[in-house]
Image (cartoon, rainbow, N blue to C red):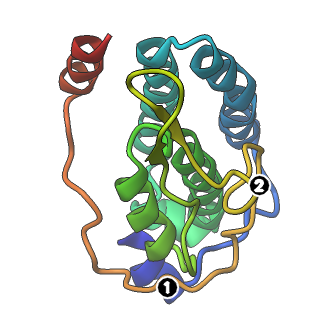
Amino acid sequence: NLIDRDFGGIVPVAENPSNEDRALIEQVQDSYGKVGTLIEKGKLSAALKAVMDSIASANKYIVDEKPWDESVLASGRAKEVIGTLAIFIENANKLMYPFVPHASQRVYEAFGGEGTIAPMPRHAESSSQQGVLTGDYERGATWQFSTEWQGRQLTDGKATIFNKFKLEDIIQAFNDLD
């Protein structure tokens, strides 16, 4: 990956963000309120779609900014782009956690996280026939914007975390749950 190849496995720090960098960061920052509200209302498909729309914007940002291009590397812009993407990935990973906790854990570990990003939910008995899904919500990742991954050493810059999925397939799987 680019962090391993071009930055010695250390996540670069974005120090001089451009307007495009700031827009991407603001988008993921604003997603916490929107996605959280949708989850609280039980609108899981809409919440997941909101996160995936944000991720699609990040994909467009990558294509537009071309951090792999030699001229972008030579200008120093790649450092800002990769640093911005690290902030985005850190936060998008927390936003995805309610939907794909195991995948979020793998991303967290790849970016040098230790322990668990958040305790896994568990089924508990209750007065209802089905019981409840609960967990230890006092520890682990917080539902707020952060930039802790900048400057971290990747654990394995050559590891494939997961393969690409089509957004339509993911949304269909969640629609089938509703």
In the rendered structure, which amino acid carries the disc numbered 1? Answer: Gly
Q: Mark 1 or mark 2, which is nearer to you? A: 2
Q: Residue 147, position in %: x, y?
A: 75, 60
Residue 104 shown left or right of residue 151 in the figure: left
Residue 78 shown left or right of residue 178 in the figure: right
51, 4: nearer the viewer: 51
122, 143: nearer the viewer: 122
Q: Residue 126, position in %: x, y?
A: 53, 32
Q: Quadrant of the C terminus?
A: top left
Q: Quadrant of the N terminus?
A: bottom left
2, 29: nearer the viewer: 29
In the rendered image of this protein, does residue 163 appear above or below residue 53? below
Q: CA distance from mark 1 to mark 2?
A: 20 Å
Q: Residue at x 69, y 79 (%)?
A: 151
As drawn, the label of residue 9 is 1
Secondary structure at badge 1 equals loop
Secondary structure at badge 2 equals loop
Q: Residue 133, position in %: x, y?
A: 49, 37
Residue to which mark 2 is pinned: 146
Q: Residue at x 67, y 25 (%)?
A: 36
